[in-house]
Image (cartoon, grey):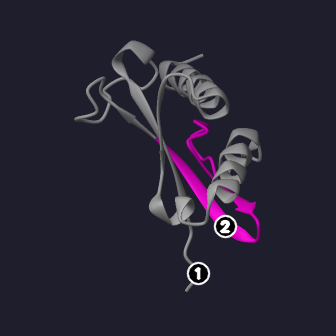
Amino acid sequence: MNAPLQSASRIRELNDLFRTCFIGGRVLITEGVTALGQDFTSGCVEAVQRFSDFTADNDPYGEHDFGCVPVDGRKVCWKIDHYDPDCRYGSESPADPDQTTRVLTIMLVSEY
């Protein structure tokens, strides 16, 4: 297996662990989500943790770093970003948990 595929596989493994267990990073929930109340917010967190519908269309690099889920009739998206340990810059090595802080953002998609 070549290095980019190994790297994507390791990033995917770390992203899945973080998304499902919140181990290895920080979770941010936007004000749009929290404004809809604790029950809605909890439903969003649970939906993100259970998400497994990764396809070539929504996960072209195989890193499991983005998804959208319906929660109580609303569309909620989540995204994992990779930062250096101080969260000042992007991580130079997202496959290395010692060099990376993962940040999961859960956000409400506004309808036009």
Q: Position of residue 9 (x, y in %)?
A: 60, 24
Which residue is denoted by mark 2 in the rendering?
75
Say whether residue 22 is magenta.
no
Q: Is residue 89 left or right of residue 35?
A: left
| Residue depicted at x 46% and y 21% | 95
Quote the CA–CA distance across marks 2 and 1: 9 Å
The disc labelled 1 sits on which kind of residue?
Glu
Q: Position of residue 22 (x, y in %)?
A: 58, 29
Q: Which residues are magenta?
A: 57-80
The disc labelled 2 sits on which kind of residue?
Lys
Query: In this picture, is 28 found above or below 16?
Result: below
Which residue is denoted by mark 1 in the rendering?
111
Circle 1: element type? loop
Q: How many marks?
A: 2
Q: Residues within 10 Å of mark 2 (few under 14, many from 20)?
A: some
Query: Looking at the image, which is closer to me, 5 or 68?
Result: 68
| Residue depicted at x 59% and y 57% | 77
- Rendered-image quadrant of the C terminus: bottom right
Furthest-front residue in this view? 38
* Residue 83 location, quadrant: top left
